[in-house]
Amino acid sequence: MKYIKLNTNESPFPPSPHVAERISGEEARLNLYPDPACSELAAAAAAALGVGPENLIFTNGSDELLNFAFLAFCDAERGIVFPDITYGLYPVLCEMYGIPYRKIPVGADFGINPQDFFGIGQNVVIANPNAPTGLVLSVSDIELIVRENPGRVVIVDEAYIAFGGESCVGLIKKYDNLLVARTFSKSHSLAGARLGMGIGSAELIGYLNKVKYSFNPYSINRITLLAGLAAFEDENYYIENCKEVIATRERVKAEIRALGFTVTDSKANFLFAKSDRIGGRKLYDKLRQCGVLVRHFDVPGISDYNRITIGSKSQMEAFLDAVRNIINDREIIK
Ligand code: PMP
């Protein structure tokens, strides 16, 4: 069966046509190693973000950046805290490196209370918007968390920031303990190219570069470097795509609420929803049988929910048709 993939938060849009032009042109020159410093990309990103190239590091997806950051800033004495409902990679990295970690409970509505993260004595990582809830913290809340943890690194994972949240990148000039993680996988349609970006003080970036250069200075290949550059050169294309994703998200949210779903106020390219008629795992299975893949987490507190990536308009119509059929089936017992 050919599935409609609404399970990994990819963009339904292809990269900008400019990306294809760039990577198939003469510059690709795959006989040469890539530039480990990613200088051209750094210059373009620095101009776009209003920071210096020394404030930037590029990695093979933002997962690699998170990996480097946990390795660079955490150890057996200096652990890390994060919300109990968040991106699954954080505890995985801690387990792998033997880093002590603590999960701070989110509220009954899945909201993060910034004060719970004040003066924590450990490093902090927060996905903003959070995953899989899609809930955002304001820049002022993030600033408080960064300010109240001097001498500790606060990582803000902005993988989904382009879909309605406000970026805290501007704070890096004021706080040397803030690292912002970005990805080109979601808003910039480059999940397959693997490109992530870290933004922080020159000091933090220096530590991260030590890790990067020890593993593999060439982790961003020449094609991905060009694709990233082309993405910066065609920012309007992505802004329009994000607008469309946001509009589709709001429409689908209203539709499933009308069908009795509880849906968080997601500012990401996915919805997080539970039905009053069918359990989370059952809905996941039934959607799969209809050819629609969503993401179910068999985790206490959220197992009634599914995370649904916002795809193209037609993909979402197919999703809504499937949902309507499933929940109108009289056989369904929660
Ligand atoms: N952070 C969060 C919160 C994510 O959901 C993801 C995607 N799974 C990533 C980071 C990593 O994305 P990538 O490695 O593709 O940049």
Image (cartoon, rainbow, N blue to C red):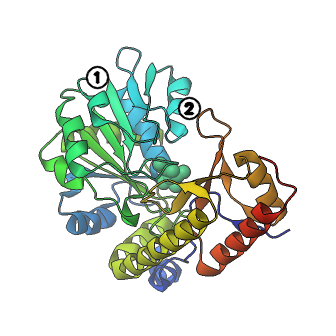
- Percent position of residue 255, x then y: 58, 70
Which residue is label 2 attached to? 92
Q: Mark 1 to mark 2: distance in Å?
A: 21 Å
- Percent position of residue 156, x then y: 34, 44
Which residue is label 1 attached to? 120
Side of 295 where 130 appears, left or right: left
180 or 298, which lies in front?
298
Name the residue located 73 percent from the left edge and 68 percent from the top edge: 324
Q: Give the residue furthest to the left.
A: 174
Name the residue located 33 percent from the left edge and 55 percent from the top edge: 37
Where's the N terminus, which quadrant?
A: bottom right
- Percent position of residue 278, x then y: 74, 51
248 or 30, which lies in front?
248
132 or 275, which lies in front?
275
Side of 107 where 165 appears, left or right: left
Q: What residue type is labelled 1?
A: Ile
Instruction: Give the vertical position of 125 relative to 188 (above or below).
Output: above
